[in-house]
Structure formats: C-alpha cells, structure tokens
Image (cartoon, helix red, strand yellow):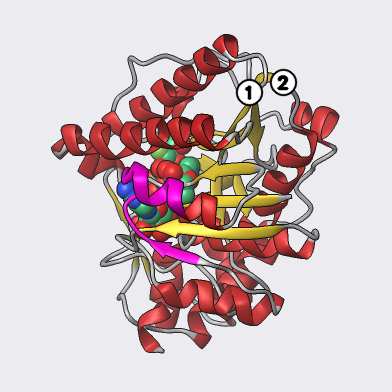
Amino acid sequence: MRVLLAGGAGYIGAHTAVALIEAGHDVLVVDDLSNSSAQAIARVEQITGADVPLLIADVRDEEAVAAFVRTHAPVDAVINFAGLKAVGESVAEPVRYYDVNLGAAIVLLKVMKTEGIRTIVFSSSATVYGDPEHLPLSEESRTGIDLANPYGKTKRIIEEILRDAATADAQLQAVSLRYFNPVGAHESGLIGEDPTGTPNNLMPYVARVAVGSLDRVGIFGDDYDTPDGTGQRDYIHVVDLAAGHVAALEHAGPGYDVFNLGTGVPVSVLELIAAFERAAGRELPRQILPRRAGDVAASYCDPSKAQRDLGWTAARTIDDAARDSWNWQSRNPNGYAGD
Ligand code: NAD
Ligand code: UFG
C-alpha cells in the first residue's frame, strides 16, 4: 500500500514511516515543518534505505496536496498526524487550534474524495475522555466535547467528522486511534522526540534533565489518590504506537471505528523518573511542585479492543522507553538542530 503521512515529519509520524516501510509499504509525507525538521525524514531514509518524497506545505493547501498525491498515484491511504498539540497554547489561541486542526482534517477528506483514496487513520488522543469516570478507559467510556481545552475538543470534533463522512460514503474506511502517552524513540537513536523550547511532557523533560540542559524535574503534585501520590499515565513506546498504525491500516474495513492505543499499565511520575535513572545510570534532581491545572490523577486504558480486532498489542515496557529515549537524547543533545 502507498500511504500519505500528513504531519509525517513529526515525532509519531517519523516512527510510523519507518514501521510502514519495514512492513513493505511506501510512504510520502506532507508537512509544513512548523514543529519538525526535514532532517527527520532524511533519518527515516537512513534507517530504512527507502526514498521518502516530502512536500513542504501546509496540509490545508488543497491544490498542493492533491497535485502531490497525483504525482505519486496511486495513493491508497492517508494518516493524519498534522496539527497543533499544546494543550495550554490551545486555551490561549483557540481559533488557531480549530483553524489548523479541523482545517487539516477537512482538506484531507476533500483530497481523498477527488483522488479516490478510501482509507484514513486519524491521530486522536486519550484527552477525549476528559476526567475519567472509571478506569481503565475503554472505547465505550464517556467522551464529550465539554472538555477542558480546545485541543481536546478538536480531536473529539474530528472523530465525529470522520464518523459522519463514513456514514455518508459506504466506501470510506476511517479509523481514529486514541493514543495514550507516547514516549521513547527508535532503537537506532536516529529519530526521537524533539520538542521546541522547554518540554511540556514528562519524559522529554526528564531526558533534558538527564542530559544536563535542565536543572531538575518538577513533579506536579504528590498528593493525588494514587499509590505513591503522583499522577499515573499509560506510557506507550512510540515504536509500538507506530506498529498500531500499520495494524489499523491493514485491518481497516468500510465504516468508522475507534481504538485505544496504550499498554493498560499505569505508571506514576516517580516510577518513570526511576526508570530513566536506571537507563541513564545517574540520579536525577527533582522537586515537588503544586499540581498542574487541568491534570487528572490517573489515566490508563483497556487495550483489549485493539488486541482483538487489530491483532496489536504493546510489547515494550517503560524501561525500554527510558533506555531508547536516553539513547536518542544523549546522541542528539540538541535534537535535529545538532546536524
Ligand atoms: P508533532 O508536532 O511532532 O507532529 C505533528 C506534525 O504536523 C509536525 O511535523 C508539524 O510540523 C506538522 N504540522 C502541523 N500543522 C501542520 C499543517 N497545517 N500542515 C502540515 N503539517 C503540519 O506531534 P506528534 O507528537 O508526532 O503528534 C502527532 C499527532 O498525534 C498530533 O495530531 C497530536 O495531536 C496527536 N497526539 C499526540 C500525542 C503526544 O503526546 N505526542 C498524544 C495524543 C495525540
Ligand atoms: N508531569 C510532571 N512534571 C512535568 C511534566 C509532567 O510531574 O514536568 C506529570 C503530569 O502532572 C502528569 C504526568 O507527568 O501526571 C504526565 O504528564 P504529560 O504532560 O507528559 O502528559 P499528559 O498526560 O498531561 O498529557 C498528554 C498529552 C496531551 C493530552 C493528554 C491527555 O501530552 O496532548 O495526555 O490525553 F491531551
């Protein structure tokens, strides 16, 4: 199959490109590089030995994307990673978030229609569950658009757009993948997470402390109702997550479907830091800070639907993720900018 990766130069897109190529598929990428580097695609080519055509454009440029697809026809499927993803920024700039995230999804569906592409996989998020009523979260758990932030609402709205599009078009195959917390890096250390500025997420923050570019890990609250008082999340290795996209594409059938992609194993902030300390072989300075606004105590999934319907399961542990994240960070202390 030949697959267009929108936002494919980003963290999850680059790892998925490698997984698809290694599974025998061809990929092409459209990315405006607003949160990534063309170097990521060069490194995907280095890992796989494949050519990966890259169109540097805003995915909302319908004519440019359609022309790119025609040049590489036939394209069989689209994966939509493209969008803005900073929760706090989405509260400050909601209109930009709706514009980019919804605009990207709508233009891709339009291009699919004109170019005869029937399959789309969308990067959704565990954020659509908001504050969980019950754990673990299954695909049947309550979701809403009454979520705390515009970022999460864009994910929820795009899921509904895909459902409606699949209802209207019997040939469309649409899948939303609700990622839990992606972490880790490719085992080569050639591609990994390279956030601009100070990382918002825990593992890249810990990685920067381990490499010495940040002083200490701030722990956002140690008084949650969890075993050690710190927040629990379902950290999924990005290479497992990438394999989930390959499985979703290979199993997609007509209609709309949604899958949780996670491990089902809750890991606390203190447990993640301890895993990173084992990987880096050093103690990491830390400090307890107040809770971060909007954080939930615990979030982890029941991954059994993906296992049953896609034959997919997360194989890697938090220690694997810490080892691979440390390998990537220590080889590339300045990310792709070091090239
Ligand atoms: P990322 O920022 O590394 O990747 C997104 C890519 O999209 C970037 O390369 C960026 O340059 C590109 N992009 C953004 N707007 C674009 C536009 N208008 N046109 C073309 N390209 C555009 O993020 P990621 O962590 O790889 O996440 C990929 C997707 O998964 C996102 O949709 C994100 O919301 C979703 N997601 C991520 C996480 C996470 O924690 N990383 C969790 C759940 C869901
Ligand atoms: N944390 C810290 N210190 C930090 C960063 C995070 O203690 O410097 C804690 C948080 O309080 C939380 C845990 O580490 O308990 C994980 O936090 P992340 O920011 O790494 O991840 P979140 O679960 O908060 O956010 C992720 C994605 C969002 C998505 C959200 C809900 O980054 O895009 O999951 O699914 F919206």
- 292 vs 190, nearest the viewer: 190
- The residue furthest left is 92
Query: Residue 282: x percent and y percent?
Result: 53, 81
> Which residue carries the number 1 mark?
172
Instruction: Identify residue type, mark 2.
Output: Pro
Determine whether label 1 and label 2 are within 8 Å by CB. yes
Task: Please tell me which residue is depicted at 34% across the width and 57% down the height of the picture.
Answer: 57
Q: Is residue 297 visible?
A: no
Left or right position of 141 against 151:
right
Query: Residue 159: x percent and y percent?
Result: 49, 23
Task: Please tell me which residue is depicted at 63% across the width and 82% down the height of the picture.
Answer: 46
| Above-or-below relation of 81 to 156 | below
| Above-or-below relation of 15 to 269 | below
Residue 66 located within the stretch drawn in magenta = yes
In which quadrant is the C terminus drawn? bottom left
CA distance separating discs 1 and 2: 6 Å
| Above-or-below relation of 188 to 172 | below
Query: Few, some or many C-alpha atoms within 10 Å of disc 1 (few <14, some 14-19, many ≥20)?
Result: many
- 147 vs 26, nearest the viewer: 26
Q: Which secondary structure lies at badge 1?
A: loop
Instruction: Give the magenta-colored segment's residue range.
Output: 54-67
Residue 103 located within the stretch drawn in magenta = no
Asked if the beta carbon under badge 2 is closer than 8 A to the nearest atom of ligand 1, the reply is no
Identify the disc placed on residue 254: 2
Query: Residue 63: x percent and y percent?
Result: 35, 45
| Above-or-below relation of 273 to 166 | below
- 14 vs 90, nearest the viewer: 14
Asked if the beta carbon under badge 1 is closer than 8 A to the nearest atom of ligand 1, the reply is no
Quarter of the image where one finds residue 321: bottom right
Instruction: Identify residue type, mark 1.
Output: Leu
Query: Few, some or many C-alpha atoms within 10 Å of disc 2 (few <14, some 14-19, many ≥20)?
Result: some
Left or right position of 337 against 50:
left
